[in-house]
Image: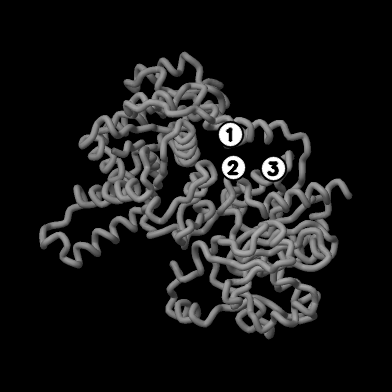
């Protein structure tokens, strides 16, 4: 029988439910249990594919091609296991399935109701995911904040599951305790209200993770315990940390894992966060620093810099840094600023990454940055859109095809070195944007004497994709003559998956997203090598 842990949020969004869910999973995994995590998002979008990254953070892509919330990336990085399309659901997807079933007369003509039919669909999806992953403990993260209209039906599903099996379902609330500057003390009232709101949905939390800038003191713990009707030891302090992978270790200081297993009537099989502790220590004690430039266009959220648009890339660089006993310092460069100021502002950086993107805003700034890296022999990694910009830069400045561009940016370019594949064109004509791109894991063959082959140490790899435009093969011969190496292609040789150039310490562009497959205990080889080259570049300069 699978046990279920529902993780819900109190007071405000962005409080760290995804990291809490992944951390609980990591702890239970270390105690010898098979764990899986599922995310429920309360929006009407069927998937996360069409959302602006600045609004909702980066879109993560699973192996089987589901465009989903970035929390699923967090689960993969922490648990070092794959999550799939069935580990994710949205309000839109749930309603769509129920409506389709009603249209197909699968409810035998009866009246289909919001309750219980929607929660029943949710429950059946949760159970199916547990079955498919063979999870002994399934963690279900409910997006949004308790008290919002949007996630009531998901809470209802959890309540119904607990009713059916009280000993097999527990609720963890991640709640925020503010410390207003002028008052100077930690306030428990918002959390009290959040718990009361959860109670009104027929649910009492078994644990409260108290998120705050500082650790929880015994006075507040007592207060929460009395007002929220919950034992003191079940209130776990969750202060801010600088390195997110410290969170499981923090929870374990309060014996969270033991208490969860006790609630479920389970015994620890082994206790081993040893490697985890070692990795965290390696990172935090690293003395060497490298400066990494991220040249992108999804940073501004009003007046704030928003790093979540590129979270997988940032984490993959950190994983690569641990293997090289150093710490990265990230510097954000808005591509549009580079268009005006030129690429000289990248002078002091040890390496440059141009990550994923869509549309034409800022692309000339990215091209300037890439030209600078190519000419100054600065380590460069281009991911997806970044690779396409590198192709354009090379075509213009090395192959002398002056007006080269991508069809995505300029429909009338005389040299569409990046173009739309014919079977994609009909979708765009019909304005079908969702799910019409190359998604999920695709195989790739690496060229024997290339840098990529040296990095991966094998000929056939599998990496994940999320893009619509491809390299135009009409230009392959010309570019090869001028020193570009097509180091990765699809097995049939038709699609270019990765490029490098000759006589450069590290100039790599990939059409795929290696960052999606990096995890905390197992850094992706490409990021390991990139960081290693950045370190070497630093010591030479």
> Can the viewer see residue 192?
no
Residue 295 image-quadrant placement: bottom right
| Horizontal and vertical percent position of residue 108 | 11, 61
Q: Nearer the viewer, residue 308 or 274?
A: 274
Query: Badge 3 is on which residue?
Result: 323
Circle 1 — which element? helix
Residue at coordinates 58% horizontally, 30% vertically from top-left?
Answer: 274
Query: Badge 1 is on which residue?
Result: 276
Q: CA distance from mark 3 to mark 1?
A: 13 Å
> Can the viewer see residue 238?
yes
Circle 3 — which element? helix
Count the numbered circles shown.
3
Mark 3: few, some, or many residues within 10 Å (few <14, many ≥20)?
many
Residue at coordinates 85% horizontally, 61% vertically from top-left?
Answer: 376
Specify whether 462 is left or right of 175.
Answer: right
| Horizontal and vertical percent position of residue 149 | 32, 45
Q: Nearer the viewer, residue 539 or 420?
A: 539
Which of the marked residues, 3 or 1, is nearer the chain's N terminus?
1
Which quadrant, please, contains the N terminus? top left
């Amino acid at each position: 029988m699978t046990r279920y842990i529902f993780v819900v949020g109190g007071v405000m969004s962005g409080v760290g439910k995804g990291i809490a869910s992944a951390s609980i999973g990591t702890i239970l995994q270390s105690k010898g249990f098979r764990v899986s995590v599922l995310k429920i998002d309360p929006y009407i979008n069927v998937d996360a594919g069409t959302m602006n990254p600045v609004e909702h953070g980066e879109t993560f892509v699973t192996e089987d091609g589901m465009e989903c919330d970035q929390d699923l990336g967090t689960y993969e990085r922490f648990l070092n296991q794959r999550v799939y399309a069935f580990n994710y659901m949205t309000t839109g997807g749930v309603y769509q399935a129920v409506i389709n079933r009603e249209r197909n007369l699968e409810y035998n003509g009866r009246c289909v109701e919001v309750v219980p039919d929607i929660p029943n669909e949710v429950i059946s999806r949760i159970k199916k995911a547990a079955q498919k992953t063979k999870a002994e403990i399934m963690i279900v993260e409910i997006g949004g904040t308790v008290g919002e209209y949007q996630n009531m039906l998901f809470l209802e599903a959890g309540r119904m599951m607990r009713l059916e099996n009280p000993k097999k379902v527990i609720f963890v609330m991640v709640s925020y305790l503010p410390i207003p500057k002028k008052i100077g003390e930690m306030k428990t009232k918002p959390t009290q209200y959040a718990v009361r709101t959860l109670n009104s949905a027929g649910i009492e939390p078994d644990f409260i993770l108290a998120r705050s800038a500082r650790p929880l003191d015994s006075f507040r713990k007592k207060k929460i315990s009395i007002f929220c009707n919950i034992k003191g030891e079940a209130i776990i302090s969750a202060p801010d940390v600088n390195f997110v992978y410290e969170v499981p270790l923090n929870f374990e200081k309060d014996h969270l894992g033991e208490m969860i297993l006790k609630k479920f009537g389970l015994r620890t099989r082994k206790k081993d966060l040893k490697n985890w502790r070692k990795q965290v220590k390696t990172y935090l004690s690293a003395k060497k620093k490298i400066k990494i430039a991220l040249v992108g266009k999804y940073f501004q959220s009003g007046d704030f810099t928003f790093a979540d648009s590129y979270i997988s890339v940032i984490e993959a660089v950190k994983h690569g840094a641990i293997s090289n006993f150093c710490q990265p310092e990230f510097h954000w460069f808005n591509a549009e600023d580079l268009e005006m100021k030129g690429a000289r502002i990248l002078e002091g950086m040890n390496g440059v990454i141009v990550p994923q993107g869509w549309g034409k805003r800022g692309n000339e700034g990215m091209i300037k940055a890439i030209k600078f890296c190519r000419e100054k022999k600065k380590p460069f990694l281009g991911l997806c859109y970044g690779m396409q910009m590198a192709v354009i830069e090379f075509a213009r400045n090395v192959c002398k095809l002056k007006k080269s561009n991508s069809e995505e940016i300029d429909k009338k370019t005389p040299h569409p070195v990046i173009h739309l594949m014919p079977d994609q064109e009909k979708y765009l004509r019909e304005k079908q944007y969702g799910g019409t791109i190359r998604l999920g894991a695709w195989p790739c063959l690496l060229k024997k004497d290339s840098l990529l082959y040296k990095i991966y140490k094998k000929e056939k790899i599998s990496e994940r994709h999320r893009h619509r435009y491809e390299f135009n093969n009409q230009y392959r011969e010309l570019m090869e003559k001028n020193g570009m190496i097509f180091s990765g292609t699809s097995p049939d040789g038709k699609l270019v998956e990765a490029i490098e150039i000759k006589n450069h310490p590290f100039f790599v562009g990939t059409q795929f997203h290696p960052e999606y497959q990096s995890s905390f205990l197992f850094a992706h080889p490409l990021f390991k090598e990139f960081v290693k080259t950045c370190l070497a570049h630093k010591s030479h300069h």
